[in-house]
Amino acid sequence: LLLLLLKHCGAKLKSDNPSALKEVVSLIQEQSEQVVKANGKEHNQRVQFMMDAILDLKKKRKRRENQIDDKIRRLKKWLVTIKTYKNHFGVTSLRISWKDLTDGALNRGRWWLVGSAWTNATVDQPSRKEKEIDHTKIDKKAEGESKLFSLAAQQRMNTSVRKSVFCIIMGASDFEDAFERLTRLELSGKQDREIMKVLVDCCGQEKAYNPYYALLAERFCEYESKYKFTLQLTFWDVFKQLETTSARRSANLARLLAHLIIKNRISIGILKVIEAEKLSSSGILFHKVLFYTIINDTDNETFVSVFKRVGHGAVENSFVCSTIAVLLNKFSVKMNDDWPDDKKKAYRKRLKIATKMLDGF
């Protein structure tokens, strides 16, 4: 306990009252010498170690244990820096299994290193049955890719980039798989904008809303901020086409935008370009679904933050706030008689909070 106290508080004690500490150390040395003379032998190792620690504190010498602690501290700091870098730039870990590290290295090489993948012709050849199974899998995969390409043509994916993005989004096993494959496309210039455009288009074409597209869009926004701007431009194009958009597409895209607003990937200020008096029935449906989702699918803190973010710089955003307030009051879903009383109360309260916040800005 005394050694632990010296390790953590010794430097502070010395800086607070160095003269008193010097007197204490001198007394300890005197008592130590008297004990050695009385016993006629030196201290055991534990006592000697304690005495050395006290003398090191007096002479301002760093013990080896403290030097090791400094190294560990620097190593921890370096690891935190690596973790921060990974989260900031969206670096995704490779999915390398234990089998890849052991058996896979003999058959395919170390595929996670550039130029290290290979095919070993000397390994045991598979049986005829295994070959037939492999060919069946390959045929099915080729058939699936062929169907995706034909579907891409039907969906008016008229460039090779759009077709590739479409096939990856629709053929991925989950949103993380799609994200990894899309980032490996290495699109140049403005070609990466096609990712968000195809994603939004695919979401609108679904028969029912699929949160897969929202998770994928959110992942790209985390990865790089330029995708937020691309999404904003894409939704502005959607707003221009609301007059001719089907009800199903409007509802799907409204829920997609609501998810991104709730997750703070896009500001609700994106609605500033909307002209309420010119909205068609599809446009009205879009805003009803949007506001209903924001009001009902958020906790209190998130709901408040959605409208609070648009109020920063009230002078510049006064027009934006007034536009959103008009849309909210005009196109929010009317309460249904079948709703429970607590739901009606919560819905009415949140509408009041949002309106008050927007009017306050």
Image (cartoon, helix red, strand yellow):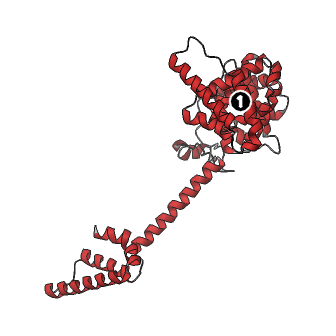
Residue 1 in the image: above or below residue 240: below
In the image shown, does 247 or 274 lie closer to the viewer?
274
Residue at 61% x, 48% y is 87
Residue 308 figure quarter: top right
Where residue 141 appears, as percent x and y from the top left, is 68, 27
In the image shown, does 2 or 75 lie closer to the viewer?
2
Q: Provide the secondary structure element on which disc 1 rests.
A: helix
Q: Is residue 125 visible?
A: no
- Which residue corresponds to mark 1? 325
Residue at the right extreme, as displayed: 158
Looking at the image, residue 218 sits to the left or right of residue 283; the answer is: left
Looking at the image, residue 269 sits to the left or right of residue 262; the answer is: right
Q: Is residue 46 visible?
A: yes
Where residue 39 appears, as percent x and y from the top left, is 14, 84
Residue 272 figure quarter: top right
Q: Amino acid at mark 1?
A: Ala
